[in-house]
Amino acid sequence: MSGRVEDERLRVQQLRALRRRWLRDQELSPREPVLPPRKLGPVAAFWERFLQPGQPWRQQVHKLYQTGSFVMLRLLLPAWAITYYLKYHARKSPHGVVVTNPRIFPGDRILETGEIMPPLRDELHKHH
């Protein structure tokens, strides 16, 4: 009986062999992947050398960052918040920092110049 069953077994055997070979081909050797050499411009080359681990400049930048964040978070922001609160919320009149100008109505005298405020003009366009 060399019919359909034998042909099918042979076909399945060949497919399994092809799959095994394909899977073996997918494994990378230690030399792969082969990439072209990177061409860096002058700025990128500088940063590549500058940011290598263990460089003294990198340590200095880290120290500067830590100092700056300490000064900002522990000194400047709290000082700003305290100043803002004292300026706008804690002090009361007449010692408050924020002073509002007195209201001026038509016919009042302006203290600085001595002028009298003219009356308001009537609106010609009454669209309300």
Image (cartoon, rainbow, N blue to C red):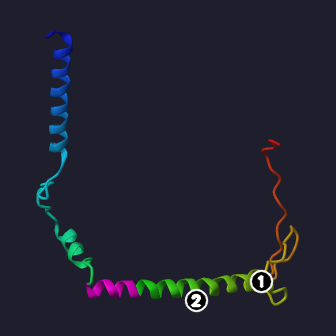
Residue 86, disc:
none
In magenta segment, residue 46: no
Q: Residue at x 16, y 65 (%)?
A: 40
Q: Looking at the figure, which quarter contains the N terminus?
A: top left
Q: Is residue 24 left or right of residue 106?
A: left
Dot 1 or dot 2: first in sequence order is: 2
Query: Which mark's residue is nearer the viewer, 1 or 2?
Result: 2
Q: Quadrant location of residue 26?
A: top left
Label 2, residues with CA under 10 Å away: few <14, some 14-19, many ≥20: few
| Foreground pick, 39 / 26 | 26
In magenta segment, residue 58: yes
Residue 112, disc:
1
Q: Residue at x 21, y 68 (%)?
A: 44
Where is residue 77 drawn, in percent x and y? 60, 82
Q: Which residues are magenta?
A: 55-63
| Foreground pick, 26 / 92 | 26
Where is residue 82 drawn, in percent x and y? 69, 86
| Foreground pick, 107 / 77 | 77
Label 1, residues with CA under 10 Å away: few <14, some 14-19, many ≥20: few
Above or below: residue 16 compared with residue 42: above
Q: Amino acid at mark 1?
A: Glu
**For numbered disc 1, what is the local secondary structure?**
loop
Q: Amino acid at mark 2?
A: Leu
**For numbered disc 2, what is the local secondary structure?**
helix
Residue 75, disc:
2
Tell me the CA gap for discs 1 and 2. Answer: 42 Å
Q: Residue at x 82, y 82 (%)?
A: 111
